[in-house]
Image (cartoon, rainbow, N blue to C red):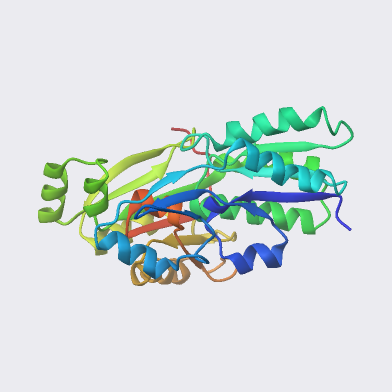
Amino acid sequence: MRSYVLTCCSTADMPVDYFNKRDIPFLCFHYLLDGEEYPDDLGQTISFPDFYNRIAAGSMPTTSQVNLAEYLDFFASYLNDGKDILHISFSSGLSGSYNTAVAAREQLISMYPQRKILIVDSLGASSGYGLLTDMAADMRDDGKTIEEVYEWLEENRLKLHHWFFSADLTHYKRGGRISAASAAVGGMLNICPLMNMSYDGKLIPRKKIRGKKQVINEIVNIMEVHAKDGLNYSGKCFISNSACYDDARKVADLIEGRFSSLNGKVTINSVGAVIGSHTGPGTVALFFFGDKRMD
């Protein structure tokens, strides 16, 4: 029997079956859609196609993080079973969820002084956050202690690259993330913004690339530059997409054709409802291990 439990949040954007099979309990963020609140339960309550179809039809969902009471109840359920907890949090650069998890830890640690509650700020999102959690699960299953896994996560979280592009700027305009003029010009010129996650876990625009084919090629070129051992990269590679599987598949096919030493096929997941509330349809995100994120 394992002496500790590995946990995360729904914003790791992995399938429910994955979390069940890997024995990784998760907390759900929340979103409000057309006046109703739902748990971000990875497509169980509202399917991903239905969610993105509603956005395409004009719905503007809003999101909320896991609150303190939810963290307290969730952590206490495992502490009461005599388990230590290693919780990997959604990026502090995008949400206050990490700080809330730490606050829950501070309340609980005095009540359970014999137990360990370790909190890691993933500085990541979507299936990049999921890939970091997956590595932690591999180490746990290999018999690593909670301290060993925690130290590895702290030392390697910035080696996990997050690169993504959007071929549809409609939702960015609706949400006020770009101006109507920028969206119009981007649409006319067929601009696909290429972005990544910075060292402090924030989303940073890096390039404006004209045409979907060009941005797909460029994101794979970037992986070649930054991946550990370049074209000899032998780690795992995850992709997430918001209602644009064909684009994600094109990226995956290029990667599988170029990187012959990959650890298995590229895994393609769906961007969940919380992150998808901010991106809308048309986003492809690529995740792999490489050199350290410095800016």
Residue 101 vertical placement versus 237 (above, below): above
Is residue 169 visible in the rendered structure shown here?
A: no
What residue occupies the far front of the structure in this picture? 35
How many numbered marks, from 0 up? Answer: 0
Residue 251: image location, x then y, percent? 39, 66
User: Taking 113 as reference, is 286 left or right?
Assistant: left
Which residue is at a point 39% across and 59% down the rendered structure image?
Answer: 220
> In the depicted view, which residue is nearer to us: 107 or 217?
107
Relative to the observer, which residue lies in front, 272 or 167? Answer: 272
Q: Is residue 223 above or below residue 79?
A: below
Decide if residue 221 is on the left or right side of residue 65: left
Q: Residue 102 vs residue 198: left or right?
A: right
The front one of 156 and 1 is 1
User: Where does residue 104 sit, x and y in percent of width and height?
Assistant: 68, 33
Q: In the rendered view of the protein, which quadrant contains the N terminus?
A: bottom right
Does the rendering let one see residue 67? Answer: yes
Q: Position of residue 290 (x, y in %)?
A: 53, 48
Tell whether 282 sits left or right of 272: left
Q: Quadrant of the C terminus?
A: top left
Q: Position of residue 96 (x, y in %)?
A: 52, 34
Q: Quadrant of residue 202?
A: top left
Res 109 → quadrant: top right
Which residue shows up at 36% across the image and 38% down it?
A: 204
